[in-house]
Each structure stands twice: as C-alpha cells, then as structure tokens.
Image (cartoon, grey):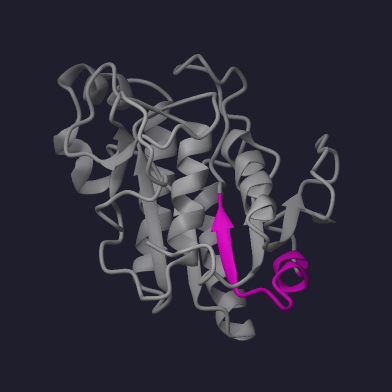
Amino acid sequence: MIRELDRKPMNLLVLGASGGCGQWLVRLARERGHHVRALVRPATPFNPPAGIEVIRGEVLEEGVLDRALEGCGAVLSALGIQRKTPWNPWSALASPPDLATQAARRLVETMLGHGVRRVVAISAGGVGESVRQLHPLLRWLIANSNVAASYRDLEGMEAVFAGSGLDWLAVRPTTLRAGPPTGTIQVVQHFGLFSHISRGDVAAWMLAAAERPEPFTERTPMIGTTGRRRRKSAWSAKRP
C-alpha cells in the first residue's frame, strides 16, 4: 500500500467524468492532491470541485484526446455505452454500440504519441472469461437484453488495451450502486444476484491502482464489497 508521504501528485485525465463513477474519480483524485483534467461532452451539465481543469469535447472527435492528454501522466476511463433508460436492460441504446472500443483505439494511439503509458478503465463483471463467474440468471439477462451490447463493447475495449503494449488495467465491478467509498472492497471470484459495489468504491480502487508504482500484473480483476466496513484503505490487500 502507498503511504500518504510516499504518494506523489500526478497529472490525471478522467474520461467519462460526468458519470456516476467519473464524478467520484474526479473528486477523490483532487482530494488526494492530484492535478485532474476532466473531459466532458459539450452539452453535459458538470459542476466539478474547485481546482479541476475541464475540457469540453467529444471523446471520438478528431483532436480532442490529443488536446486532453497534453502533459498527463495517466488516464482513468469511466466510459461506457448508455441506454436511454439506464435501469431498463431492454432500453434502446443512447450511445454508439462500440463507444468504449472506438475510444480505446483512439486513446491508445494518442497515448503512445504523448508517451503516456498507464490507463485504468472500467469494464464489468461477466465480460470475457469472467462470464463463468456469473449467476445463471445474470448470464440469461445479459444474453437476452441490451446489456449484451455493453458487454460486447467492453470486451472489445479490453482487447484493444491487451494489444496496445500499454500498462493497462480494466477493472470488472459487480452490480454498481450509488454511494460513497466504504473501504470494503475486495477481489471476488463470484458475481451473484445480490453482489454489488458502490460507485465511490470503484473510483477509490481505480485511483489507488493508478497510484501504484509497479506495473500491473493482473489485468482484469473483478471487484465487489465485503459487506462490512474496514478500517484499512480502500486499496484491497489483494492488489490488481
């Protein structure tokens, strides 16, 4: 675990900064003394904490990532396709069906051009080989609803990062819920019907990963909560 005195401020770019996890990433990173640049769509309401640098633009627009990455040391991505009615698994998509995959391709190219090596992104429990760790009812829901589009997109994003040569990590949370960090995060091996994690906890875990000095070895950990509060940091004893 990185001690407070050992942690050095970083220049971080947050993608998807206006979303549930993205807002927590911005807030926690600023509280921990980092310089934070948030990329936000032009028409999206966004009221960041004091000291946050905001860049308005579409992540897939030519030149936007090049401008956003200037001077950054690492990227935290909370991008993902959205449904028009988020709580409805069968709702129509409100984003391109390959948003995260397209963004990853542009991001990798631009990061390499700027010499930025580290990216931590949000994926989802059940993506790729972790589908075997899902409860059968969750597997059915994903396969028979528009959630499948999100999972295909996230799998494509992971594949882009895997072939990039970057120091990358795509964390796979269980069911997301609104809420602050609780300090009860752990790497899990099963995604049950009632498995969940707060968006604040996901953001805290991602930020701790970005601060880690050594390269990532486990690329796609699945994380959930223990169900009880710990006194320790949100950085799990089992690191990514």
Q: Quadrant of the N terminus?
A: bottom left
- Give the residues drawn in magenta, as a range: 63-77
**Nearest the camera: 230 or 172?**
230
Residue 16 shows up from this direction: no
Residue 70 shows up from this direction: yes
Q: Which of the 4 image quadrants contains residue 57?
A: bottom right
The count of marks equals 0
Query: What residue is drawn where x is 52% and y is 61%?
Result: 104
Is 69 placed above or below 93 here?
Answer: below
Q: Quadrant of the C terminus?
A: bottom left
Task: Describe residue 174's horizontal placement relative to residue 189 as left or right.
Answer: right
**Residue 73 is a magenta residue:** yes
Task: Describe residue 169's horizontal placement relative to residue 20 as left or right.
Answer: left
Q: Which of the 4 image quadrants contains residue 135?
A: top left
Query: What residue is drawn where x is 67% and y is 48%?
Result: 26
Is 157 placed above or below 164 here?
Answer: above
Query: What residue is drawn where x is 39% and y is 79%?
Result: 165
**Residue 180 is a magenta residue:** no
Query: What residue is drawn where x is 85% and y is 46%?
Result: 42
**Nearest the camera: 55 or 188?**
188
Task: Describe residue 126's horizontal placement relative to residue 136 as left or right.
Answer: right
Is 121 placed above or below 87 here?
Answer: below
Q: Which of the 4 image quadrants contains residue 2?
A: bottom left
Task: Describe residue 188's horizontal placement relative to residue 2 as left or right.
Answer: left
Residue 155, position as x, y percentages in the image = 35, 50
Residue 114, position as x, y percentages in the image = 64, 83
Residue 159, position as x, y percentages in the image = 35, 61
